[in-house]
Image (cartoon, grey):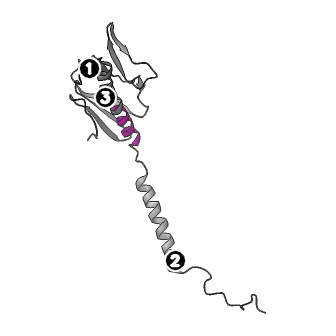
Amino acid sequence: MPISATGNRLPRDAGVTLVEALTALMIVGLMAGAVMLLAPGPDRDVRQEAERFAARALLASEESIIVNRTIALVVTHEGYGFERLENNGWSPAEHGSPLGFRAWPSNIEARVEESTAASDDPRVARFDAVGNVTPARVVMSGAGARWRVTIEGTGEVDVARAE
């Protein structure tokens, strides 16, 4: 007794061939490989914090020229921020401003590698009103990665992997 109108035979296009199955597996494998290559590595947090630090240092350099005041980068073990030289001395940037104090993330450690400031002075770099900067280097490390932020005397700020 036939089960279907065509008899017991299946139509020729029922199922997939081995070539079609292998092609589908190859496409899935390529897509999985692309996702793995584009996924951020474990040092992503350190790199992002170094880039954020560098961007804020560059902003301080530009702001010192705009407001015609010396601005200093203050780096401590707890975090970093900026101070402006006023007539009555140094005053910290407001807490909510882009130049306000920012604590280091708990998984990142930072240290001043090079600065012309005195060893007990937390103001590691100064940006003056005409664009001059006291050079400094800060190294951030965490998750097995180290990134160096270099502040040049010309006001340029560079982020590079520290070896």
The residue at the point 33 percent across, 16 percent down is 84
Mark 3 element type: strand
The residue at the point 24 percent across, 25 percent down is 131
From the viewer's side, name the closer residue of 155 and 79.
155
Q: Quadrant of the N terminus?
A: bottom right
- Nearer to us of marks 2 and 3 is 2
Instruction: Give the residue type at disc 1.
Output: Ala
Q: Report if residue 50 lies within the magenta region.
A: yes
Q: Position of residue 14 (x, y in %)?
A: 62, 82
Identify the mark nearer the N-term, 1 or 2. 2
Q: Are marks 3 and 1 in contact (CB under 8 Å)?
A: no
* Alpha carbon distance from label 2 to label 3: 57 Å
The residue at the point 61 percent across, 87 percent down is 12
How packed mark 2 is, by other alpha carbons closer than 10 Å (few <14, some 14-19, many 20 or more), is few
How packed mark 3 is, by other alpha carbons closer than 10 Å (few <14, some 14-19, many 20 or more), is some
* Alpha carbon distance from label 1 to label 2: 68 Å
- The disc at residue 129 is 1
In this rendering, the answer to whether 122 lies above or below 13 is above
- The disc at residue 111 is 3
Quadrant position of residue 85: top left
Q: Quadrant of the C terminus?
A: top left
- Nearer to us of marks 1 and 2 is 1
- Where does label 2 land, which residue? 20
Q: Main secondary structure of the magenta part?
A: helix
Q: Report if residue 109 lies within the magenta region.
A: no
